[in-house]
Image (spheres, rainbow, N blue to C red):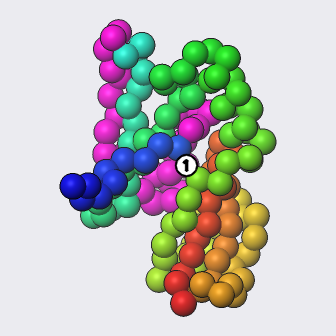
Amino acid sequence: MIERMSHTCVWVLDQDSAKDFYTGKLGLEVRSDVVMGPEFGGSRWLTVGPPGGVGEIILADPAMGHDPTTAAQIRELVAKGALGMGVWATADCRATFAELSGRGVEFLQPPAERPYGVEAVFRDDSGNWFSLTERA
């Protein structure tokens, strides 16, 4: 039986820049940062997660597991902001918006009342967008 999702993947354009963004601006912690062997194409396994939380986000180069054409297509989609990657939960959307804005996070939409709570939308440094949501 499935117990939980342990990892999810976010495609990033530059892993070093993404590491700085997710740790320095979003306040996540590095969980893994290793270069895998030649049997895995020398890919870098870089994961982050909320301090004290469970689950990890793989900050993946699109070349990991893909042929060059597919990797280029993924990069193009990420760069133009075509991928909405998920929802971050917060107890206070407005306060978290103010904190993250102060750290330089680019918001596409400020906090607004929604039927499901309060939501703001931001982008990471690669172009992926996320919802920041305080449940009703």
Q: Residues within 10 Å of mark 1 (few under 14, many from 20)?
A: some
* Image quadrant in which the C terminus is located: bottom right
Q: Nearer the viewer, residue 117 or 3?
A: 3
Q: Secondary structure at mark 1?
A: helix
Q: In this rendering, would 109 be left or right of 49?
A: right
In the displayed structure, would residue 75 be above or below residue 58?
A: above
Mark 1 sits on what residue? 21
Q: Residue at x 70, y 27 (%)?
A: 73
Judged from this view, the residue extending furthest toward the top is 38
* Image quadrant in which the N terminus is located: bottom left
Q: In this rendering, would 95 be left or right of 36?
A: right
Image coords of residue 114 (percent x, y):
68, 85
Judged from this view, the residue extending furthest toward the front is 1
Q: Nearer the viewer, residue 108 or 97?
A: 108
Q: What are the residue bounds of the magenta stretch? A: 11-39
Q: Residue at x 38, y 42 (%)?
A: 47
Please tell me whether residue 19 belongs to the stretch shown in magenta: yes
Image coords of residue 42 (percent x, y):
40, 15
Q: Quadrant of residue 39?
A: top left
Image coords of residue 66 (percent x, y):
54, 21
Q: Quadrant of residue 37?
A: top left
Tag 1: amino acid: Phe
Image coords of residue 84 (percent x, y):
65, 54
